[in-house]
Structures are given as structure tokens and as C-alpha cells.
Image (tube, rainbow, N blue to C red):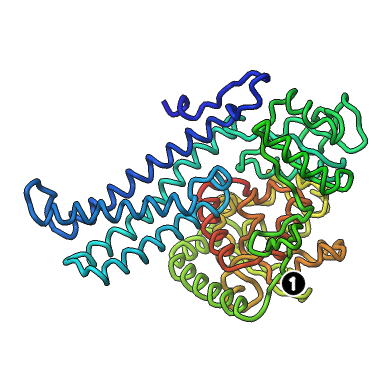
Amino acid sequence: MADEIFAPARTPLSAVNTPAGLQWQRRYVLALVLSDVIVVSVSLACAQMVRLGRPITAGDPASIYFLILSMFVAAIWLALLAAYRTRSPRIVGAGVEEYRRVVSATLATIGVVAVALMIFRPEYARGYLAVAFPLGLAALLVGRNVCRSYLARQRRRGRCVVTVLAVGDIRAVRSLVQSLTRGWGYGYSVVGVCLTGHTSGGSIDIPGVGTLPVLGDEGKVHDAILKTNADTVALTTTDHLGPEGVREMSWNLHKLGVDLVVTPGVVDVAGPRLTMRPVAGLPLIHVEKPQYSGTKKVQKLAFDYVVSVGVLLCALPVMLASAIAIKLTSRGPVFYRSERIGLDGKPFQMIKFRTMVDGADKQVDSLRSANDSVGGVLFKVKDDPRVTAVGRLLRKYSIDELPQFFNVLHRDMSVVGPRPPLRREVDTYNDQVRRRLLVLPGITGLWQVSGRSDLSWEDSVRLDLSYVENWSITNDVLIAVKTVRTVATGSGAY
């Protein structure tokens, strides 16, 4: 049944002037509407039962009173969820914007209802709403998570995607295709390219993606859409078209029912740092500078201390059991200390539970040929013979990293940040990569929730630089939450 609801329509190429290929979006939005209606209704009904202390019964004046109040609150809540565009196809399925809008709409509902309470002063409403709103918000977020998890499974199968025609010069198009492929959860699938100065025919090889057909240059976009049935045109460069050419293209695409997106060429910059300001009809994008000091630094310090103390207290039994297991099953110390390079290039001693045989560092040269890390800078061996039986279990669930929270309390590390590098790695850094050292290294980070040891060196650097450029306390909280899920599955750890 669910597969039928979200199955993408298969449309003949002659019908490209109607957006039938995106019918799955309308079905998905309808599913979100139904989910929100059910969640809000059930949450308000549960709050009513909690407030009355008994089931809802017909003819009971109190039940009727709360039923009318619930209908009033539900109407406002659902209206604001729609007004805040929490179900917009532009933001559903991936990223945090969907969740942010749901929270904002709920807070706005609380504000509207609070004003109504002050004006009309209904009886018994405050305790009832104190249950309804937290319960409803939690249920709404869980409902959205369930829906997007299903959507993610469909997108892994190549369904429920937005087909894209990439237009621009070869370097920009390659970068765009690689970025969209990495962010597959957003549902963009490039089906063809139009390259500046190229004629129709042939193909372009995209590293890590494969080959895509070249369908001409910027002047062949209309024909390329008819061939590929693309839903969206992604314009990467506008030099050859000029302002008039871009405007004419947008008009032509509107007639076809095809969306136009323009990439500014700015990579790995988060939304909060971008501000668009129209000046004389020209949209200018202002990129804010990264902030590492002031209030943000105090927020990060508080976050690190609170999380570290909480984790160490909760994980104390696990840490004691791990220490005993290490001591009883292999010779050597319980803890392993390794020199790492921290903030501004200063070295420090990182502490972990020992997961390898004693003296494992001396065996690195003999295992160099077995390195599984792409790029050669990192040293990772999936079936490393130096790892003990207990060590494999500790590594799988990142238990070996728990002592690093003492490094956080000592301010050598942070809970979230770039991966702490070895000195030999830092010696290979160029000026761009050295920006990783502008913030404290972290126990977890974007690299941890995006593949852990399965990442290549280039991907690890890209994620770390993205974190450094876009650091915020909100991102730290989200990464910490995702880390719990990643560690629980044990994926990418060896």
C-alpha cells in the first residue's frame, strides 16, 4: 500500500509540459497532512484524558468543553503548520529545515493560544495545554522522522527523486553532480548535462559517480529536457548567458513546468551564513565570516562540560568493565596515549582504551601495504591483526573513545569537532587543510556520522572544513544526536 502511494508516475516524454513526474511529491505531502492531523488530534485527546483523569464520555459537560477547546487548538496548530510551509517539497526528506519549521510553527501556536487564554480566560485550559503541546511536538517530530525514513528507503532504490539537468562549464558541473550524489538523501538525480562549448553527443565522466550524457550547450536546454524528461534545470554558471539569457531561460522553463535552480558557486557554506539582498534587481548573496569567539565560544564551552560530565557519570560502569576486560585478556596498560595535534597546531596526549596488542605502533611499517584508507594519508586496516578480541568490540561501539571526555574536560578536545590528526598527517597539510586547526578537535564530528572509517581522505577533509566554516551550537547538538545512532549500529567502525 505504501509503495503504491509513493510510486513515481511514469510519464511519456511528450507530456513533459505537465509536472506529472513529480506526482510523488503531492502524494508525500498528502501523507504528511494526514500524519499531522492524526498526531495533533491524538495528542490533544491524550491531554484531555490526562487533564480529566478519566476517558472522554458523551454527554459529559467537561468532555464537551475540552472537545471544543481541542478543535480550536487543532485548527490553529494545523493552520500554522501549513503557513510555515512545513510540508514544502523544497525542504522535506533531508536536512534540519523541516524540523526547524515544525518547531517554529508549534511555538507560534503556543503564542497564539497564550494570547487567547489571556483574553478569554477559559477554565482548566493551562494544565491541559501543558501536556498537549510537548506531547504533540514530540509526536510531530517522530512522525516526520518516520515519513522521511521511508522516503530515504525509496530514494536508495532510485524512486521519489527530482531529475536534474545540469548546465554550465565542465568543472562546475562536475562539482555539482558530485555534491548532489553525496547528498542523495535530498533526492536529486542528475540525468544529463549541457556543457559550455560542447555539442550534443558523447558523455562526461564524473569521478565517484560514473558517466552522464552530454546533450549540447546552454542553447540546447529545451531539447535536452525533451530527451531526459528532467524536472529541474540546475544552472552552475551564467557567464555565457548573461542576465537576459538567464531570465529568458527561466521564462521558457516556466512554460514547460520545469524548475530552475542557480548554484552560486559557494561550497560548504551553511544557510545561516548566507543572506540574499536584492540590489537594483540583482540578487546579491552575502557570505558571513565564520565565528569562533564571543558568545558562541561560551556556548560551546558549556556544551562540552555538560555533555562530558554527563557521559562520564553514566558510562562509569561500562568503563570499569572495559578496563577489567582489557587487563584480563591481554598484556599491557589499560589506556593508550597518542600524540595528536590540537588547536592552533599545539600537540597533546589523547587518551583511549587500549584495543591493540602492546607495542602495536612499532608494527605500522610492516602493515603499510595493507592500508585500506584511500589517499594514503590516513592509516586504516579493516582486519588489523594487532586488534585484540576485546578491542574489536570496544571499537565497534566506540567504547574505546570514552576516556577522551577527560581530554575534553582538560580542554585539549571538544565533544564535536574535526578528527584529531597525527603529526605526520599535519605535516602533509596545505594552507587550506590547516584551517582544520582553527577549532578544537572533537571526539565526534561530521566525519563520524558520515561514514567513520569508510571515508576517504578527501571526504574526511571536506567534512572537517565544512564543520570549521559553519560551526554552530545547533550543529553540535545535531551531530551529537546522530552520533548516538551511528555508534549504536556500529557501522563504519574498525
Q: Residue 214, percent across and down?
A: 84, 29
Picture residue at 83% right of the left edge, 63% below the top:
432
Identify which residue, 388 or 289, lies in the foreground: 289
Identify which residue, 403 or 439, lies in the foreground: 439
Q: Residue 454, percent across and down?
A: 68, 46
Please identify the residue farthest to the front as the structure is shown. Answer: 280
Please identify the residue farthest to the left as the structure is shown. Answer: 59
Picture residue at 63% right of the left edge, 69% below the top:
351
Disc 1 marks which residue?
438
In the image, residue 362 sits, relative to residue 214, either above or below, namely: below
Find residue 439 and report its image quarter.
bottom right
Horizontal relation, residue 160 to residue 427: left or right: left
In the image, residue 212 sits, relative to residue 473, either above or below, namely: above
Horizontal relation, residue 226 to residue 1: left or right: right
Mark 1 lies on a secondary structure that is helix
Picture residue at 43% right of the left edge, 66% below the top:
314
Please identify the residue farthest to the right as the structure is shown. Answer: 197
Picture residue at 79% right of the left edge, 30% below the top:
212
Q: Quadrant of the image for the N terminus?
A: top left
